[in-house]
Amino acid sequence: MIPTILPPLDPAFQPLEAVTRAYEKDVAASGRGVPFAVCIVRNQGYCDFYAMDIFPDGEDERTVPLMDRLVKFMLWSRGGYQIIVSGSRAVYDHLKDVYREGGARFFDADFMARVYEKPFEVIWKDSVEDVKVSRSSASNVGRHLKGCRIGFDAGGSDRKVSAVIDGEAVYSEEVVWFPKVTADPQYHYDGILTAMKTAASHMPRVDAIGVSSAGVYIDNKIMVASLFLKVSREDFDQRVKSMYIDVAREIGAPLEVANDGDVTALAGAMELGMGNVLGIAMGTSEAAGYVDKDMNITGWLNENAFAPVDFSPEAMEDEWSGDIGCGVKYFSQDAVIKLAPAAGIHLDESLSPAEKLKVVQKEMMDGHPGAAKIYESIGVYFGHTIAWYARFYDIDHVLIMGRVTSGQGGALLLNKAQEVLDKEYPALAGKIQLHIPDENSRRVGQSVAAASLPDIG
């Protein structure tokens, strides 16, 4: 499949769904396809697999690099410390090499080993059927609205907090901060505590605290989070890992912390009143989350900022992971910033990323044609990527939120994504509905949904 709609400011974009469909078509036409499967194992033995037919080893140069991208997507969407492979020794040997210490994907292996506190492994199985195993455990969290609650959403450029009484936000605020460039944990602690005390001052009491935050959380502990990028590992272990727990103790209320992507999906499910919702928050990074048909959170990692979406060798590199073509450069303020030069918009390098985004948003309001092409380009990225996501998630609804979707650009982005689905992937267009909340919900909806996380009985 050769896509007919490409981003006007990034014609080198190679959507992974289109590339994979073309490969599958060629495999089927050849009559020589062989079964391939990969399984990702995470905590408590939970696991998920993906299986497809591929060319036999050595017959097509696309096989190894394409399976590299597919496996990496599975790893970051599901999360895990073990990759089990069957059906291609060439793919297995490649994965063993790139995920080893010093290999091209060692960042990924080290990240997962820290999250799951187990050594990272790539394992071979002779039988494809032995790899096609899935064990999951969805959990019913959120949607608790009674009482006086604080909802906090920790972003990389701003922090949002809401005071919520019986499901209604009586106060919300956004405050600019710079956690990703600050090494002192006290800065983070003071910012979080100040936000919560501000929200508390607008309610007669605090019954519960819900937190939506980028990163990985186990038992309300911060395992890994880009917000603390500059904090040393020693300070992280001693002062950051239990930071939300410590703040909640000072406020004097029970706490529930969830990944911001899952809270995005939860906000969508609550708004729509139904499940199979993929939520995407386009802000400092890309946050993704998923709620299944029963409106439960699956326990998947859903760190799609690090999951690949572009097969182009010219794709931009993510500074943190060192990989190219990953979601963070396509569905965040980084995407706006990277496309600005091609749109003829100059951004002062002394500005923060959030300030650069505001410059582009103002140009959009003023009718700059280049600004519109930025949002059109992100919309094209998104349309193709929704089809790619649909390989790995059962999606009926996609909800987009975050500061990138604010203003006129958000509507343009969504319309372009719908056009791509309609023309390039008509079967999916008839199944998947795209949604964008109103302006107020778009900017503070996550903190309100976060407030519903704790169950206080």
Image (cartoon, helix red, strand yellow):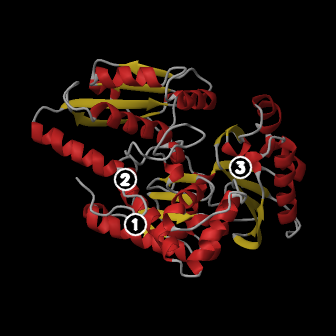
* Residue 335 locus on image (x, y percent): 53, 57
Dot 3 amino acid type: Glu
Q: Is residue 455 visible?
A: no
The residue that label 3 is drawn on is: 256
Question: Dot 3 surroundings within 10 Å: few (below 14), some, or many (20 or more)?
Answer: many
- In the rendered image, the vertical position of residue 420 relative to residue 217, given as above or below: below
**Residue under pointer 2:** 12
Q: Residues within 10 Å of mark 2 (few under 14, many from 20)?
A: some
Q: Amino acid at mark 1?
A: Ala
Residue type marked 2: Ala
- The circle drawn on residue 417 is 1
Q: CA distance from mark 3 to mark 2?
A: 43 Å
Horizontal arrangement in the rendering, residue 449 relative to residue 107 (left or right): right
Tell me the SS state at disc 1: helix
Name the residue rendered at 43%, 27% in the picture: 83
- In the rendered image of this protein, does residue 106 appear above or below residue 166? above
Of callouts 2 and 1, the N-terminal one: 2
Query: Is 330 placed left or right of 131 in the picture?
Result: right
- Front residue (pair 222, 59): 59
- Nearer the observer, disc 2 or disc 1? 2
In the rendered structure, are the residues bearing label 3 and label 1 in contact, judged by CB atoms less than 8 Å apart? Answer: no
Q: What is the spatial separation of the Cα atoms under label 3 and label 1, in whole angstroms?
A: 34 Å
